[in-house]
Every structure is written in structure tokens, then in C-alpha cells.
Amino acid sequence: MTSIAFIGLGNMGLPMAFNLLKANFDVFGTDLNPDFVAKLMEAGGHGCPSIKDAVVKADVVVTMLPSGTIVKNVYLGEGGVFEHAKAGTLFIDSSTIDVASAREVAAAAAERGFDMVDAPVSGGVTGAAAGTLAFMVGGTVTAFDRAAPILDPMGAKIVHAGQAGNGQAAKICNNMLLAISMIGTCEAFNLGRKLGLEDQILFDITSAASGQSWSLTSYCPVPGPVPTSPANNDYKAGFATALMLKDLRLAMEASETSGANTPLGEHAKDIYTTMNDQGHGGVDFSGIMKMLDGSL
């Protein structure tokens, strides 16, 4: 049985680890929060008090961590993954971090003879629980081919984006586009209301016209047209504003270092910064609708 060390059992990591257990992998998990470790054990996994204990016999290490700094420390730091992993271990980092950090850790892994992929996800907590995440994977073809069977129980779509760091690049480009399109969708509904259009009528027209987008048809930011959208649940987060802002900041950092011109991305970051700074970081990112109409 393949042994998997899972480091980072938070809101995303824990349900991902559950899906690996359901696929009959042997999962050894560790997290700074002992409650998450206890939940893994209740589901049939093995709780570990340290990175060393989780990693030392693992065939695969999966990480889901909050930042590039933490990822580098977990892999490169004293007592970290590289120090204790056995030869031939495969590393999968599903954190959403900056491209430069992803490439730095991948290069360090390659220098030590390890295969590694960056495999950030799209789909949120709901997708993590359902095993329907989309994985954007950066790394060598060999590393991708090794990682795909591990990612499969956790995701519905697995795409090889190219070299190390390209998974992170794809993630931040996608989420920058999502943020921009959501703001535009909210502005359209706000204007429509001011002009006397009913939300459902505007939805019916734009969803079948050139204004159609995922932000409109799958995640509509007004109550009614899409029953499963957070707008119908008082904008409780499927994807929190604070998380969208994190991704936009990563995108703008990458834009600056690469020399890309992304004025709408920068403006979207400013709008989500305002919403977050007003104390609404836990509200779903489609809650921009409420900020625009003054009800937030």
C-alpha cells in the first residue's frame, strides 16, 4: 500500500486527506492544530506529532500550506521534509504560493534527486470534500506522471501546465481573471437594478448573450438565478474575500517581476483590499455585490 504523508490538515487539506483514505492509501498526517490530526485518525489515518514522523517512511509527501515562506521552511528548514524523506519520495505541493518560491523548492528537490510538482487547486472546500478539485500541475513529465494517480482521488481535472512553477502561474492567472469577471458581473447587476431591470430578467438575457461567464452562470452574485451560489446563503464563503485577495496579491507580485501589464488585475486587488479592510474578509468574494449596493 502506498504511504502518503499529508502536511497541513486545514479546511482544504483535511477533506483531501479523507479522499486519499477512501482510495485506500495509507495516510500519515500532521498539522499544528491537534484537532485536525484527531479527525484524520477518526477517519482511519495515522496522526503524527512532527514532520519527521509523518515523512520518514512515506512514498509520497503532499503539502497544503498557507504561504511560500511556510512551504520553504517545511521543505528546506531544519527538521523539514528534505531532511527526513527517503530516497525516491515524490513531493506534491498543493499550496497556493508565489511562483518564485515554488520554483526554488522544486529546484532544491531536483538537486537532491527527488521528483516534485506544484499542484495548486481550484474548487474550494466544497470541491475538496467532493473530490472534484481541478489541479494545475507544474513539473517534469516524469513527476507529473507519478503524481497523477495520487491526485486522481482528490480531483476531477488534472492538467499538466508545464515546468516547475507553472501550476502556480496558471492558478494566479485564473483567479485574477475570476476576480475581474466577478466585479464586472456585480457592476452589471448593480446598474441593471438602478435602471429598473429585474435580476432574473438580466440573468436570462446575459446568460444567453455575449456577457455570459462562469461568474454569471455558475456563481451568480445575486440571489435567485443560481440556487447553489453563495448569494442565496447570505454570501457565506465558498471562496472567501481574504483568499481571493491573497491570490490577487500573488498575481500582482508576479506581474511586477515579469513586467506584465495588468491594470484591471491591480484595480481588482484594490477593490478586494477595501472590502477586506472593512472587516469582510470572511464574506464570499461575490459579496462585492453587497459592497456596490451599499448593503455590506
Image: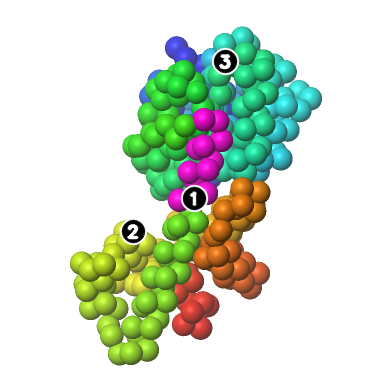
Q: Position of residue 184 (x, y in %)?
A: 42, 71
Name the quadrant of the N terminus: top left
- Examine the structure image and report whether residue 1 is included in the region drawn in magenta: no
Location of mark 2 (residue) = 214
Give the residue displayed 55% in from the left and 31% down from the top. Answer: 164
Measured along the vertical axis of the image, is residue 220 above or below residue 243?
Answer: below
Mark 2 crowd level (few <14, some 14–19, many ≥20, 10 Å Cα): few
Residue 243 in which image quadrant: bottom right
In the image, what residue type sits under mark 1?
Cys
- The magenta region covers 163-174
Helix, strand or loop status at disc 1: helix
Q: Position of residue 211 (x, y in %)?
A: 30, 68
Q: Position of residue 19 (x, y in %)?
A: 42, 32
Q: Which mark is residue 89?
A: 3
Location of mark 1 (residue) = 173
Mark 3 crowd level (few <14, some 14–19, many ≥20, 10 Å Cα): many
Residue placed most toward the observer, 181 or 276: 181
Helix, strand or loop status at disc 2: helix
Q: Position of residue 4 (x, y in %)?
A: 52, 21
Residue 118 in which image quadrant: top right
Residue closest to the far top = 87
Residue 223 in which image quadrant: bottom left
Q: Is residue 139 left or right of residue 34?
A: left
Residue placed most toward the observer, 166 or 27: 166
In the image, what residue type sits under mark 2?
Trp
Q: Is residue 138 left or right of residue 214?
A: right
Front of the two marks 3 and 2: 2
